[in-house]
Image (cartoon, rainbow, N blue to C red):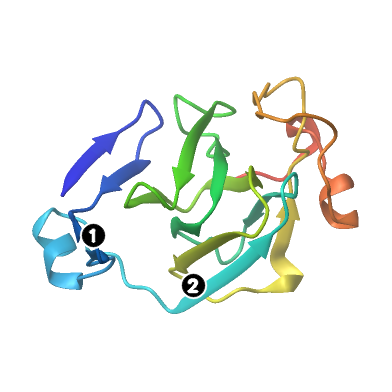
């Protein structure tokens, strides 16, 4: 396993070992002990799975009272994943990082608590799976405006994204509730 760290403290990309031949491939996508051996010892309480059409943008979501750490991956198709540091005490507050995730690359992106998270599907039937460290609480969910110019995420879009009403009504960073 290869671990890449980013400028945003805590954000990590795990590239897993993939074994394949003309019949297909095998990837061990989660092994608690192997990850713990790297110093990553998060406990997960829920697994989620979504499917999206090309151009669907989900996010940027976060919870304040029960912040979730998310270990995300794409198992079908391709997506551009984006995170924004919402920790006011962080030297990278308000900065973003984007990562391409694809079924062709056995990668997992760790999004620690304190970040807003979202992605856009770049192919039809893109399937996105993730583990979370706390249970989802709809009463605590917040949406950061996906195209806030203050943040400046460079989404790889061919046209306007398909958004839920909640995501279209996201708030800009200047008005967002954030972490300490």
Rendered residue at 26%/46% (across/down): 15
- Tell which tag, 2 or 1, sits nearer the viewer: 1
Q: Kindly tell me whether residue 180 is visible in this rendering.
A: no
Rendered residue at 83%/47% (across/down): 162
- The residue tagged 1 is 22
Element type at marker 1?
loop
- The residue tagged 2 is 134
Relative to 149, is 84 above or below?
below
Residue farthest to the left, as pictured: 37
Q: Nearer the viewer, residue 122 or 62?
A: 122
Relative to 144, is 173 above or below?
above
In the rendered structure, the answer to whether residue 116 lies left or right of residue 28 reads: right
Rendered residue at 55%/34% (across/down): 88
Relative to 9, is 20 above or below?
below
Q: Kindly tell me whether residue 160 is visible in this rendering.
A: yes
| Label 2 crowd bin: few (<14), some (14–19), many (20+), radius 10 Å | some
Q: Earlier in the sequence, mark 2 or mark 1?
A: 1
Residue 106 circle label: none
| Label 1 crowd bin: few (<14), some (14–19), many (20+), radius 10 Å | few
Q: Nearer the viewer, residue 96 or 172?
A: 96
In the rendered structure, the answer to whether residue 119 lies left or right of residue 19 reads: right
Instruction: Please state the horizontal and vertical placement of residue 54, each as a whole percent of the image.
Output: 72, 48
Rendered residue at 55%/42% (across/down): 81
Q: Nearer the viewer, residue 126 or 70?
A: 126
Q: Nearer the viewer, residue 75 or 9?
A: 75
Instruction: Please state the horizontal and vertical placement of residue 129, each as a whole percent of the image.
Output: 50, 65
């Amino acid at each position: 396993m290869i671990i890449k760290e980013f400028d945003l403290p805590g954000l990590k990309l795990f590239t897993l070992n993939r074994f394949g031949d003309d019949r297909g491939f095998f990837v061990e996508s989660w092994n608690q002990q192997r990850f713990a051996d790297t110093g990553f010892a998060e406990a997960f309480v829920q697994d989620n799975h979504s499917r999206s059409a090309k151009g669907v943008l989900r996010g940027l979501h976060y919870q304040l009272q029960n912040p979730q750490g998310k270990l995300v991956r794409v198992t079908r198709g391709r997506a551009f994943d984006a995170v924004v540091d919402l920790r006011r005490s962080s030297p990278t507050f308000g900065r973003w990082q984007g990562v391409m995730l694809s079924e062709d690359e056995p990668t997992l992106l760790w999004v620690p608590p304190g970040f807003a998270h979202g992605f856009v599907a770049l192919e039809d039937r893109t399937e996105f799976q993730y583990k979370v460290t706390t249970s989802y609480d709809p009463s605590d969910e917040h949406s950061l405006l996906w195209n806030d110019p203050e943040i400046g995420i460079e989404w790889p879009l061919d046209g306007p994204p398909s958004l839920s009403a909640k995501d279209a009504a996201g708030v800009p960073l200047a008005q967002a509730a954030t972490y300490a």
